[in-house]
Image (cartoon, rainbow, N blue to C red):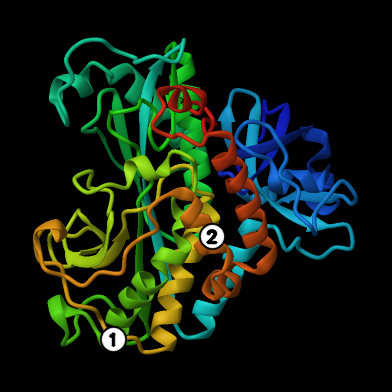
Amino acid sequence: MPDLDGVRLIGGSIVDMAGVSRAKYVPTSRLTAFQTVGMGASPSWSVFCVDGSIAFTPSLGVVGDLRIRIDPGDLRVVEDGIAWAPGDLWLQDGHPSPMCARSRLSDVVDRARAAGLSPAVGAELECTLLSADGGHATTAPWSPYGLRTSLELAAFLVDLMTAADRAGLVIDQVHTEYGHDQLEISLAPGDPVAAADDVVLARTLLGRTAAKHGMAVSFSPVPFTGEAGNGAHLHLSLATNDGPLLAGGSGPHGLTPAGGSAIAGVLDTLPELLGVYAGSALSSLRLVPGNWAGAAACWGLENREAAVRLVLGGRASAHGANIELKVVDPSANPYLAVAAFLGSALRGIDAALPLPPEASANPAEMDLDLTPLPSDQAAAIDALESSAAAAEILGAPIVEGIVSVRRHEVATYPDPANPDVAEALRLAWTC
């Protein structure tokens, strides 16, 4: 637990089915109560929508109450006088809520470990810097990955690193990205639950640091219609006591049989779980060929157009071989996205699924027999609702909640290509 000297408020947050962080605060003197009793929250917290509406389900309405509990060991100082910790949703009877995304991820991790696997997850966060009024932060010509564009943000980036150091967040890399005013940070890999916690923490620190520099941050999949979208790529590695599954084997590029089955499992469930990874009203605008968003349901070594990119291990890889899931965007609940990613890999291993043919070049230029991804958000949500894999990995209550929330988005924003939709949702996922 960090030094709480000078901390006056303790915040605990959860991420809802729409991918939005919701929080409550108590005076520091009530920290023990936040841990043991928890702070009350309506069941509606699980089905809040991006526009503040509530998408009640047949099994979740106005009756009942929940508790948000935090672990003091997870506290991080995120603002002068304020410490934050990720929260879990509990029922009043002392059991975890079936709608708690963080608890569900913990269950999936426990399943992996029970099978003798050690999973590790790392995240990449793309975001777009905005002016205080929600427009572009800069008007000068943008140089993707440019030294000039990054140095012009030097004061902001240095303050971001200072805030990360204070909060105990390990940032492996930061750079300006392809899109105008776009930034990407890479977080150090580790325990899957902690990795999802770090996503929430990183987004919070990005938002607070930007505000101090007169800017805002958008985590929208498409902040400006017709411009570059933001991803939230996830990296997964798996190992047993005998070594890693994605290196040292006799398969393509050193894959072991189980490593190949893990990739197959992720691809097998991808059409059904797309509503988890990229389920917002805007997500489909990003998932098109040529955006390096993984719009093709295939895998390939260092292939940025494939949904699953195999990152080669060896001397050039700081964290060893891993697979990157590129379809994930920042509208996803990070706990559920990681749970779906890991859970689908486990399904592939359990079923010993065969590794599909590799996309060794741009999938759009190859003759591959690929399973199509849902063509729009309504189809993605329908596929999620009927998915046995989603119910198995995430649980029926969570699937029901996601479907209800995302269908509200589809109904409210039926034309995602309308620039008004991008504007309306530009700050929806900002922490």
Q: What is the CA distance from the residue labelled 2 to the residue labelled 1? A: 27 Å
Task: Tell me if label 2 and label 1 are in contact, CB under 8 Å.
Answer: no
Using the image, tell me which numbered label, if any, was put on residue 354.
Answer: 1
Q: Disc 2 marks which amino acid?
A: Asp
Q: Is residue 312 visible?
A: no
Q: Quadrant of residue 2?
A: top right
Left or right: 204 as drawn, with respect to 237: right
| Disc 1 element | loop
Using the image, tell me which numbered label, if any, was put on residue 382.
Answer: 2
> What is the x, y in percent for residue 350?
44, 87
> What is the x, y in percent for residue 275?
49, 55
Using the image, tell me which numbered label, if any, was put on residue 87.
Answer: none
Q: Is residue 213 above or below residue 395?
A: above
Asked whether 273 or 24 is in front, the reply is 273
Q: Is residue 31 above or below residue 358?
A: above
> What is the x, y in percent for residue 264?
32, 77
Q: Nearer the viewer, mark 2 or mark 1?
A: 2
Q: Residue at x 21, y 72 (%)?
A: 369
Q: Disc 1 marks which amino acid?
A: Pro
Q: Is residue 258 above or below residue 86?
A: below
Asked whether 393 or 32 is in front, the reply is 393
Q: Is residue 61 above or below residue 12?
A: below
Which mark sits nearer the N-terminus, 2 or 1?
A: 1
Q: Residue at x 55, y 79 (%)?
A: 111
> What is the x, y in percent for residue 377?
47, 49
Left or right: 7 as drawn, with respect to 113: right
Q: Residue at x 53, y 60 (%)?
A: 382
